[in-house]
Image (cartoon, grey):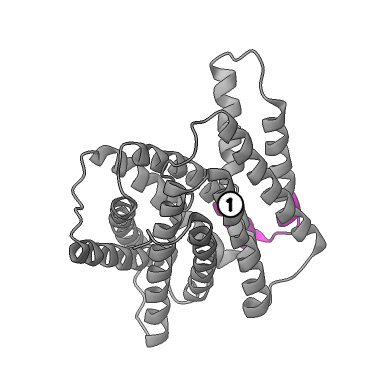
Amino acid sequence: MTSRLSAPLLMLSASLLFSMMGVCVKLASAYYSAGEIVLYRSLVGALFIGALTAVRGGSLRTQVPGMHFWRSTIGVLSLSLWFYSIGKLPLATAITLNYMSSVWMALFLIGGAVMFGAARVDSRLVATVLTGFIGVALVLQPTLDQDQFHGAFAGLLSGLGAALAYMQVTALGRVGEPEYRVVFYFSLGGIVAGACLMLTGGVHAHTPYGAALLLATGVLATVAQMMMTRAYAIGRALKNASLQYLGIAFSFIFGVVIFDDPVTLAAMAGMVLIIGAGVAATRLRQRSAPAAGESSTFES
């Protein structure tokens, strides 16, 4: 379904679609809880992938259910936190915090080096982590009210979860799991988690407008996720990661035009620092990792 497109075009398209999904999630958050949005987004994804797999003669049977379970658990938790933060923060801010995943992974590498007694820790990785967190401070600034603080904390945790999910999907790609199967089992996990969250958050009645937002969220997210997963499977990780950060620019434009989000020099400088730190962290990881061509995706 995505095999005819080049990796850069897949990443560019996926970044735009994820940003459009963020718009739908922010609009839908006025009518639904984060759990409901996760449920319906995942339900649409599972039905979409299931139908497409049946038409194209693929198989959803897997030999590594345990790996899918952990990827889905981590990914769905990250997704729920991200949707919550989108409802509480300016759109570009929520997207930026989720895109901190590359910086979190650099921090994991530093921690691993310390734990396993490496002779020295790469100072460049330390610099990328510090730069990323300075960027976060500039984006958030010390002016958050209580609701925004909760959204900001959820956004940071969503980026941490996305980093863990990224590594798990890379492992799934290495054992030969195709992108549609990874997305399908992730969607199943989202259905279960969303249903559980709805038990505590309540169920809201549908309107044609609300239902359309939920449907659009599911379709946009599923197509974008498959495009991104395919791009990482056939392209170079550094180039993909660099193009992926265009999602912040798209979200910034949507936020200003649609939601009248404020434009501040500090926030824009923070976004630039986070983007630079993420790209640098990806480049440094690539130098110590196998050549690209492995399947991975960063979105939860």
Q: Is residue 277 visible?
A: yes
Is 148 one of the magenta-colored residues? yes
Q: Residue furthest bottom?
A: 208
Question: Relative to the observer, which residue lies in front, 106 or 238?
Answer: 238
Query: How many numbered marks are there?
Result: 1
Q: Is residue 112 above or below residue 150?
A: above
Nearer-the-camera pick, 56 or 14: 56
Q: Quadrant of the N terminus?
A: bottom left
> Magenta residues, as a range?
137-155
**For residue 222, side relative to residue 127 (left or right):** left
Badge 1 amino acid: Tyr
What residue would you read off at disc 1? 99
Local crowd size for mark 1, using a 10 Å CA cut-off: few (<14), some (14–19), many (≥20) = many
Question: Where is residue 284, by image quadrant?
Answer: top right
Q: Residue at x 33, y 52 (%)?
A: 186
**For the point 52% across and 30% down, which residue is it?**
289
Check the image and report above or below for 224 versus 103: below
Inspect this view and state whether residue 153 appears.
Answer: no
Can you say whether 123 is above or below 263 in the image?
Answer: above
The x and y percentages for residue 35 are: 39, 62
Q: Residue 19: x, y in percent?
A: 54, 67
Whether residue 241 sits left or right of residue 208 in the image: it is right
Answer whether residue 84 is magenta in the image: no
Q: Mostly what secondary structure, the magenta segment? A: helix
Q: Give the image quarter of residue 281.
A: top right
Q: Residue at x 70, y 47 (%)?
A: 276
Does residue 123 appear left or right of residue 241 in this picture? Answer: right
In percent of width and height, residue 224 lies at 44, 63
Badge 1 marks a residue whose secondary structure is loop
Whether residue 146 sits left or right of residue 22 in the image: it is right
